[in-house]
Structure formats: C-alpha cells, structure tokens
Amino acid sequence: MRRLVLACCGAGALAIAVAGVVWWPGRNAAPPPTPAATPAQQQAATAPPPPPAPTPEPHRAEQAPSAPSPAPPPSFDIVKVDPAGHAVIAGRAAPGAKVTVLDGGKTIGEVSADTRGEWVLVPSNRIAPGERQLSLEAIDPATGAKSKSNDTVALAVAPPPAAGMAGSGTVAVLVPGNANEPAQALQTSHIGGGLSLDTAEVNARGELMLSGHASPGAALRLYADNQPLGTVTADAGGKWSSITPRSRGGRIELRIDQLGADGAVTQRVAEQFEPPAAAPAGSTATASLAATGASGRYTVQSGNSLWVIARQTYGEGTQYTVIYSANRSHIRDPNLIYPGQIITLPKS
C-alpha cells in the first residue's frame, strides 16, 4: 500500500511524495513516470504464492505392545488303564505346548499339544498296580513359561484279573483343585455301560455335589428322597455333574432319571448316600466312620461306598485308594462293596 505524504517545501510550494518519489507540480507538468520494475520484481509479482507450510502432526505417544495372554494351564480329559496296565492319557494345553505327565515327582511321559491344544499320551511302560496321584506340567512355546494343572487324577490301578474273571477294578477320578467343585470319574468298571452315579460329596458350603455318566446329550432329572434336586444335561462325552443345596442331613436316597425325547424315563439308577457329619470349626476331617479298637476293622453298612468311607474317615473322598490298596485281597472292584463286608481301614 502506498502512503500519501503532504509536506511544505518553502514559498508555498507544495510537494507531493508518493512512495518515496517526490514531484513538484507545475504548469502543464506531468508526474514523472514510475520506474520500471526489475526482472526479479516482475518474476516475484507473477510467481504463484508459496504453498502454506505443512501443519506438524500432533505428537502421539507410542503405545507399548500389550502383554500376551497367559497360556491356559494343562488339563486332563481322559485317563484309562486296561487290565494289562496299558494306559491312554489325554487332555488339553496351549497349542504347541510341551506337556509332561507326572506320577508324583516321576515322569510318566512327555508329549506336545497339537495346533488345537489337544494332546494324547500312550506311555511306553505299563502302569503298575497301586495308587498314585497324576498331575501335569506344560511349557508355553511362545514364552517358555511353565504352568501346572489345577486338577489332579487319583488313580488306583488294580492287579491283573485272575483267570476266569473279566474286567478291571481300576478307578481314575478327576479331583478339582477347587474343593467346592464335584469330582469326576474318568474310569470305573461301569463307565460305558449307560447311566451311572459315580461320586457324591458334600462340599464346605454344605452343597451336594454329584457326578456320573449317561448317554451323550441326555437330559437327566436328579432326586433326593423323591424330592427334585434339579435337571442336568450330559455333555458330548457322556459326563454330567451337578451342585445343589442339600435337602436335609442324614442318609438320603439319590435317584437319577434319564429321559427320552418324549420326556419318558428310559433309565434310572438309585443309590443310598449318607453325608458326613458336620465337622467342628477348625477341623479338617470327620471320623464318623473311623474304625473302632486297635484292629482298624470296619463293617460296611448299606449305602456305603469306598468314596464315602474315605471321605468320612480321612476327610477326603480321594483317599478311597488307600482303603482299596489295603483290601485288594477281597475287593476286586472298588465300586462293588456290600453291606456286612469287613474291611481294613489304615490309620493314615
């Protein structure tokens, strides 16, 4: 923009200065010509305006990569031992994980989980008769982290059957790490033979925990002394379990009805169950079935099972293997004991 400046220049003369060029007006005088622009000025006048400077992007803090999710602990799905001691053990772990099956602190075998996280181990050595506690360890291939199974398997392997006797008395029970979850029989003498009630316990909250087997996908109704406890559906492997409030104390009859598509009862099993007496505060075991006298002998009552006897004698149903081991000479099948039978109860 040009600035117009008026200035007095003596004798009343008037000078007009425009943009630094001074002109004295006179008669018939024209203003002097504007000086021609230099080539550099002409180029500057015709050049397009420079593009605006780019606006710097706001600074963004770099996000640290999220930590990988911990791998699931290894778990058991199948534990089966035939009469000759050949075993098949299967379960799940993180895909690609190296899984070790342990008998206490002894390694039974190692195997890697497939891309779906499933693994199957067929130990090269036979499982010898006796009771043992199986557990799992797994190494995550991504992080190298080692994890242990939450659950264990109480396994009682029976000796080979005598000549002329069929079947095996081997029992495998999945024992949850959470004592308020029901145990699950993985192998008994009657698994695969239809509907069964395999375990019955009362947890620390006083709830009745039941488990068994049925036809895969079958609908089941549960009863205690003919009073409904609820309904449950067997999974694809034929396993079922239930946790319900106890209807009352004392001996009860547990009944399981398997229903057909039309709702009619197709199979039924019933077992007598006597829950252990309530333990005093701070106590860890109930000895209502403890042997009397120094002999450690006990007469089986109606409705007893080795699981119930162990639960009431030692405080843990899984200790049935101790009783079974001490009585193998006259208990061929730990699931088959009868009222009036005299058994030995080890002191510990």
Image (cartoon, grey):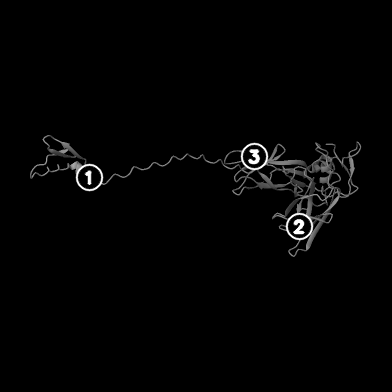
Cα gap from disc 1 to disc 2, whole angstroms: 94 Å
User: Where the N terminus falls, by quadrant?
Assistant: top left
State the residue at coordinates (76%, 57%).
220
- Write down the quadrant of residue 177 in the picture: top right
- Residue reaching furthest to the top: 10
The residue labelled by disc 2 is 220
The answer to whether residue 189 is visible is no
Residue closest to the eye, 317 or 166? 317
Q: Comparing marks 1 and 3, which lies closer to the viewer?
A: 1
The residue labelled by disc 1 is 45
- Write down the quadrant of residue 281 in the picture: top right
Three-letter amino acid code at the position of disc 2: Leu
The residue labelled by disc 3 is 147
Q: Residues within 10 Å of mark 2 (few under 14, many from 20)?
A: many
Which is nearer the N-term, disc 1 or disc 3?
Answer: 1
* Relative side of 37 to 160, left or right: left
* Relative side of 221 to 100, left or right: right
Q: Residues within 10 Å of mark 3 (few under 14, many from 20)?
A: some
Three-letter amino acid code at the position of disc 1: Ala
Three-letter amino acid code at the position of disc 3: Ser
- Regarding mark 3 in the picture, which secondary structure is present there? strand
The answer to whether residue 155 is visible is yes
The image shows residue 322 at horizontal and vertical percentages of 81, 41
